[in-house]
Amino acid sequence: MKLTVQDLNSHYGPAHILFDIGFEVGEGEVVALLGRNGAGKSTTFRSIVGLVAQRTGRITFEGKDVSARPTHEIVREGLGYVPEERRIFTDLTVEENLEVGRQPKRPNAPHWNCDKLFTLFPNLGEMKNRPGGRMSGGEQQMLTIARTLMGNPSLVLLDEPSEGLSPKIVEQMVEAILTMKKEGVSIVVSEQNLHFARLISDRAYIIERGRICFGGTMAELDARPDIRDAHLSL
Amino acid sequence: MAFYVVQFLTGLASAASLFLVASGLSIIFGVTRIVNFAHGAFYMIGAYIAFTLTERFSGAFGFWGGVLAAALAVALIGVLVEMVLLRRIYHAPELFQLLGTFGLTLMVEDLVVLIWGPDDLVGRRAPGFKGAVDFFGQNIPSYDLFLIALGPVVLGILWLLFQRTRWGVLVRAATQDRDMVAALGVNQKWLFTSVFAVGVFLAALGGALQIPRDAVHHAMDLRIIVEVFVVVVIGGLGSIVGAFVAAVLVSELNAFGILIFPKISIILVFLVMAVVLIVRPWGLFGKPEAAARKTPGLTVNPWRPLTSNERLASLAAFVVAAMLPLFAGNYALTVGSEIAIFVIFAVSLHFLMSVGGLASFGHAAYFGLGAYGVAFLAKMAGLPMIVCLLLGPLLGCMGAAIFGFFAVQLSGVYFAMLTLAFAQIVWSIAFQWVSVTGGDNGILGVWPASWAASPSHFYWLALGVAALVTIALRIAVFSPFGYALRATRDSLLRSEAVGIDAKRVQWTAFVIAGTTAGIGGALFAYLKGSVFPDNLGISLSVDALVMVLLGGVETVSGAVIGAIVYKALNIWLVSQTDLSKLVLGGFIVLIVVVFPKGIVGMLEMLAQRRRKSSPPGSSLLAKPIESAE
């Protein structure tokens, strides 16, 4: 397995947010983590990369236990993270934003550089010297993904990439994610939008109130409209 | 005309060192969010080490090599400090970081005297820049011209470093969002350490380059740090260009202030700073900052009034304290009076800082104003003691009303810096307006009336007033006003949304705290029989902060305990050792790192743990809250 999460429990202060979360991602697979607003998708991702201080459980990435490691070490193992809020460095230009994400080549992952990313996201190539603060939401979303790819990850956690984007940009996003998959990057994508998830994912997990309540292939999910309707707002 | 040009050039030359130190402070603040009070100390060590190295090694290489080696050596010391001390307090509230680095400054002041002695040291002239250039009959030292050129060169190098290197890009990214930088695989720890090293290097270089111009002495740290605070606040924290412009501005104000307004030359800069902060609270080149981490309110541990048992215990403690004259001698009673006065001072700051969430770094101003108020009334108007005691604190009240109005427009670090600047203004007036305040000689002969003259009577007076003040402020904490004030502390926006006039509430709190401090100062004037500018100096302001922290910021009356312990320890230390600053500084660092909750906070925690292990109590709420989004 590429990534295994077992018995993950997370807290923010006195509030218990995640309860015994467990899921797996295979080599080269795209897995969707579906759930409503506040279900715990973002907290799951933040916990995996070590951005939530109070967490217990076991997270294994490429056979190594990374659950007790600091964020930058987990990321340097090749586990990339794209936050939902995008968090572009607004004072830095597009190229400088990419520079922050740059990491050395990795033998088991595709290698990305600025030029290759500008072919994946042509819009970015046209505004290399524009400060991140003066880009549209869709352009920022592309930049945040490109920035994470500069670290040559073998797996990427994509937090709600389609949120707040126009349908045309969402189409480009689907294209880009499928290209990443073709290059051999494993992907976990969190989504509220089942339609979007279906276009890119092999399998799906549903998370509700901090618990995983379904796991299976997209076909298996389609066979259970009861689960789909109960946990996802369509 | 030539004279003014030369004066202008002298100002520019002074700006070079100021810019080096200020840009270092700014860079460090930008990434680590720490306002490094110890920056002046690094500047001073840089000068001392450069002095030693340039004396030891001769020739041009010895001089310039010595200057550079000194800056590098101090940068290494900085790395050590960052790894041992700062890494432990990055997540602490900003007040603790200011105090921790202040403790470091105190330690360095004593260490420097220990190593290099108390005398001023005059360093070597710079080889190749020993002469002067003639300018229409006026002389300009050629070293000044070198410094004038150096400033823009360093600015250029820093610009290249930040714009053209990967390290610079990472630093700029971390200045905006350090968690995201970590989430992209960058080791924040080393980034922080390297940033700190660069900042300290600049400070030490600034100090080392001063040796051909100025004597090296052990008080140069405080003088530069106050100026540097002014520079970064005017220029905008985190902006290097701002630091450059403001350094030039401040240096020119100093150079011409002496010529044009010799009486108020010291306060001129502070006036400019106050104006800038009021018009552009984030400085000329800075950007509005998101709200910083608040000092109190980190734990959800609701305050409650004392239970009847606790009231009885407090009463008993008061009765015991009141019986001190029955068995203690005059010296102990004088110490007791001083402690009681500092209890008043500490609870007044606590009210502003813990209840109001406004950490003032210049609270001594109002204490000192109360003292001067008494001295004016007693010496000039010849009023009786009781009238002086009642009216004297009004000077503190007035000062707090004026400065508080401006100060509460800001919050966090900027509030701390503005209050510090105001306190410096008041200090400068007391120091420079010799005809009224007596300047450095102070006002002598403020003696209590016969009914309070004996040590035991004065002790009872001080103790009684301290008790009254403490009770009054406690009542205020649990009054509707206290709730409103705590609401503005916990969330300014939400408190305004429920109809609280937040600025007005905070201003009122500022005036209450200032007046109360003035009461303490009034008693202090009678205790000592004299008033000096030191009564409103920075070190007294910091004493108050330490007392509150020592007692526990998040407790209701910890300040009382903090004042007693700290003052007793302080008086004892000064009588025991010549290195009181070293011990005291070490003590402050220790509190910040090991006991961030203070004495009373720690006792409460222990009590809660015991309660939790016995029957199930309601201690669920006492868990710390992580910085949740």
Image (cartoon, rainbow, N blue to C red):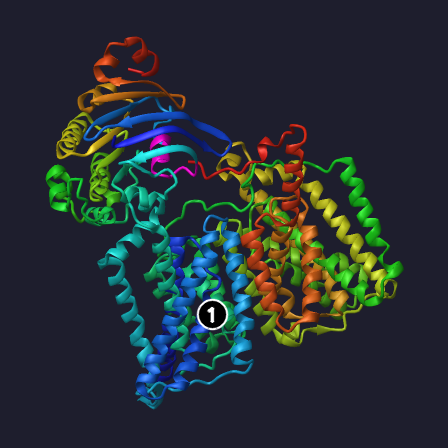
- The image quarter containing residue A226 is top left
Badge count:
1
Amino acid at pointer 1 = Ile
Q: Which residue is mark 1?
A: B224
**Residue lying farthest front?**
A63
Residue A52 magenta-highlighted: yes
Residue A90, image x, y percentages: 28, 45
Task: Identify which residue is drawn at 68% across, 55% down.
Answer: B563
Depth check, front residue: A69 or B303: A69
Residue B78 magenta-highlighted: no
Residue B75, image x, y percentages: 39, 67
For the C terminus of chain B, the quadrant is top left
Depth check, front residue: A172 or A134: A172
Residue B89, image x, y percentages: 48, 52
Q: Is residue B31 above or below residue B491?
A: below
Q: Secondary structure at mark 1?
A: helix
Residues shaded magenta: A43-54
Q: Residues within 10 Å of mark 1 (few under 14, many from 20)?
A: many
Q: Is residue B77 left or right of residue B336?
A: left
Q: Is residue B309 left or right of residue B57?
A: right
Residue B298, image x, y percentages: 54, 41
Q: Chain of mark 1?
A: B
Q: Is residue B110 visible?
A: yes
Q: Is residue B391 visible?
A: no
- The image quarter containing residue B556 is top right
Q: Is residue B171 left or right of residue B498?
A: left
For the N terminus of chain B, the quadrant is bottom left
Q: Is residue A87 above or below residue B158?
A: above
Q: Is residue B117 above or below residue B583?
A: below
